[in-house]
Image: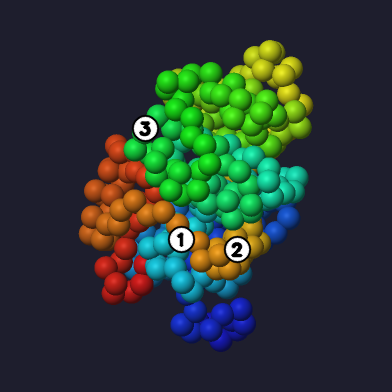
């Protein structure tokens, strides 16, 4: 720790924010640096951070669990809390079983909401329910799953859709949305579609607001960590690889469909 550092002490457990220069409020063009993208990332034994880039992680989490928070965790938290207030009793729709969707299920339940999730796997449906989902819709058996969500909500639709599918799912997400629902749109690219397209019929069926979300600020991270700590929430980790198997971990992540995060550890020698 440098002599001028005041935010932390030696021994504090910290993580780096995903957008380290984005502290609060709206992101600005000069705050778009991303470790692991435009800057060197965390796949290293040591990293040097400005103290303003770091965030304390909850004490009850293992290093492997804490490693899941900066991207998927913050993205889900921002999706749920960054728009109009999400009050207890409201309905949240999550899509699939990617890490952001799983965090969204956990956070939505933490906030007192009813959760409807989609998946195509019976085994994953059971795991979603164990995680907190109240209802699960099989999107392969029910391609018109937007209508199914409306039926499960007494015709009202979801108050918030955490839209992790992008072009492939946006049409059904709009159809599943409540009249004045919110759609937190995370993904805008697709291997099979050219971009975001919504039919006139779907668009006319709702007055939903679509809000783009891309991870979040340091303040989002800190707010989320307080909630995680207060409720003893534990992130879902699918598997852990030692540093020596980093290439294997990346290949497996790309090829498989993990239920939760894939984490690379530093073998305990220098933390994670």
Callout 1: 10 Å neighbours few (<14), some, many (20+)? Answer: some
Residue appearing at x 41%, y 54% in the figure: 236
Image quarter of residue 255: top left
* Residue 142 spot, x, y in % from top left: 47, 20
**Tag 1's secondary structure?**
loop
Q: How many marks?
A: 3
Q: Disc 3 designates what residue?
A: 121
Q: CA distance from mark 1 to mark 2?
A: 11 Å
Give 187 or 146, whichever is nearer the viewer.
Answer: 146
Residue appearing at x 39%, y 48% in the figure: 260
Q: Which corner quadrant holds the C terminus?
A: bottom left
Observer able to see residue 197: yes
Q: Earlier in the sequence, mark 2 or mark 3?
A: 3
Give 268 or 22, whichever is nearer the viewer.
Answer: 268
Q: Earlier in the sequence, mark 1 or mark 2?
A: 2
* Residue 199 spot, x, y in % from top left: 65, 14
Q: Disc 1 designates what residue?
A: 234
Relative side of 117 to 181, left or right:
left
Callout 2: 10 Å neighbours few (<14), some, many (20+)? Answer: some
C-beta proximity under 8 Å, tags 3 and 1: no
Q: Disc 2 designates what residue?
A: 227
């Amino acid at each position: 720790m440098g002599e001028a550092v005041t935010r932390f002490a030696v021994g504090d457990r910290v993580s780096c924010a995903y957008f380290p220069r984005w502290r609060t409020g709206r992101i600005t063009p000069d705050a778009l640096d991303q470790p692991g993208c435009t800057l060197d990332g965390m796949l290293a034994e040591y990293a040097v951070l400005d103290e303003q880039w770091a965030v304390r992680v909850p004490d009850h989490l293992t290093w492997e669990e804490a490693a899941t928070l900066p991207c998927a965790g913050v993205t889900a938290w921002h999706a749920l809390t960054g728009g109009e207030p999400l009050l207890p009793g409201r309905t949240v729709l999550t899509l699939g079983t990617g890490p952001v969707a799983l965090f969204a299920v956990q956070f939505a339940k933490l906030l007192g909401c009813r959760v409807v999730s989609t998946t195509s796997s019976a085994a994953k449906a059971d795991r979603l329910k164990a995680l907190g989902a109240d209802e699960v819709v099989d999107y392969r058996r029910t391609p018109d799953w937007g209508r199914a969500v409306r039926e499960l909500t007494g015709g009202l639709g979801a108050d918030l859709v955490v839209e992790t599918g992008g072009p492939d799912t946006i049409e059904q997400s709009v159809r599943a949305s409540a009249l004045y629902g919110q759609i937190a749109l995370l993904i805008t690219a697709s291997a099979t579609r050219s971009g975001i397209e919504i039919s006139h019929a779907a668009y006319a069926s709702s007055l939903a607001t679509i809000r783009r979300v891309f991870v979040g600020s340091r303040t989002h991270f800190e707010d989320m960590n307080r909630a995680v700590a207060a409720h003893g929430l534990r992130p879902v980790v699918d598997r852990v690889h030692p540093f020596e198997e980093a290439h294997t971990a990346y290949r497996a992540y790309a090829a498989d469909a993990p239920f939760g995060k894939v984490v690379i550890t530093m073998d305990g020698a220098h933390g994670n």
